Amino acid sequence: MTSRTPPPPAPAPRPGEQDPHDHAERAASFDRDADVYAQVRPTYPREALEWLLPDGARQVLDLAAGTGKLTAGAVGLLGDGADVVAVDPSAAMLAELSARLPGVATHRGTAEHIPLPDASVDAVLVGQAWHWFDAEAAVTEIARVLRPGGTLGVVWNDRDTDVDWVARFGEILHRGDHLEPVEGHQPLMELGDRFTAVEAGTFRWADRLPTGALRTLAGTRSYLLTLPDDERAARLAEVDALVRTHPDLAGRAELDLPYVTSAYRAHRR
């Protein structure tokens, strides 16, 4: 069995020097404020994880695991005896994951260079990250580390913009964002003959947050992370104004942020 050693990740860009319309710099921006990301980004509904993970899965890779939002769900669902491994290019993100999930092995790596042996896992999960990958290279690597019959599961949490205040929140976050589709949900592309046809599932739920955390959540988006400081501050002030003035938010201590979770799965032939 072989494993691939990834190249060293590029250093994170310095605050205020990023290009908010550059895909690579946006991807690298998550090194900033990883602890805040861990606190306010949503988890994933259990029903989606049950649908994504195959029966009997014991070795699971969370690819582009970040601070471990999806990892924690997999650990909780699979229980004792399961071996969940997290791979991410960001040392800061993995440090947050390890602080919250000390029993999970972590490795720095990317979807294009996964530091695991051939045919070593029953499932690969990808949460909120497929749009950052070189899809062709990632599919090759995922197929390599999956056992025959293993499952690739990809999932996105999308804010439910049918709700008025949620739509207005999204407009503040993405106004002028040339890479807006990168931040949103994109279905899997054709995976090729190494995988079965992609199946899709949808799950609706809501994440309960302190109302003041909406500003903090906005600040974890890659577009805002890479804006110049004055523009970032102006966007966050708009979020504050939305919270103060929207009739569904004004005066409330907590809110329910509705999500539509879109999940996709395919099996290794």
Image (spheres, rainbow, N blue to C red):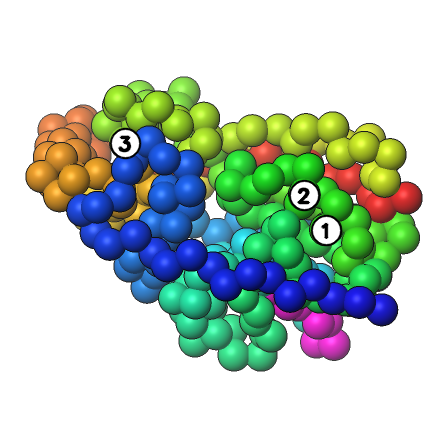
Comparing marks 3 and 2, which lies closer to the viewer? 2
Report the residue marked by disc 3.
173
Q: Which residue lies furthest to the bottom in this view?
A: 103
- Residue at x-position 71% and y-position 72%: 83
Q: Does the magenta stretch include residue 160?
A: no
**Residue 123 percent coordinates (x, y):** 75, 55
From this view, report whether residue 211 is shown above or below residue 170: below
Q: Range of the magenta residues?
A: 80-86
**Residue 256 percent coordinates (x, y):** 35, 41
Q: Within 10 angstroms of label 2, few (less than 14), some, or many (20 or more) residues?
A: few
- Mark 3 and mark 1: Cα distance apart in space: 33 Å
Q: Within 10 angstroms of label 3, few (less than 14), some, or many (20 or more) residues?
A: many
- Mark 3 and mark 2: Cα distance apart in space: 30 Å
Q: Quadrant of residue 218?
A: top left
What SS does tag 1 mark?
A: helix
- Residue at x-position 28% and y-position 59%: 33
Three-letter amino acid code at disc 1? Glu
From this view, report whether residue 225 is shown above or below residue 61: above
From this view, report whether residue 156 is shown above or below residue 161: below
Q: Quadrant of residue 169?
A: top left
Three-letter amino acid code at disc 2? Ala
Residue 25 appears left or right of 247: right
Quarter that holds the N terminus:
bottom right
Q: In which quarter of the image is residue 104?
A: bottom right
Report the residue marked by disc 1.
141
Three-letter amino acid code at disc 3? Leu
> Which mark, residue 137?
2
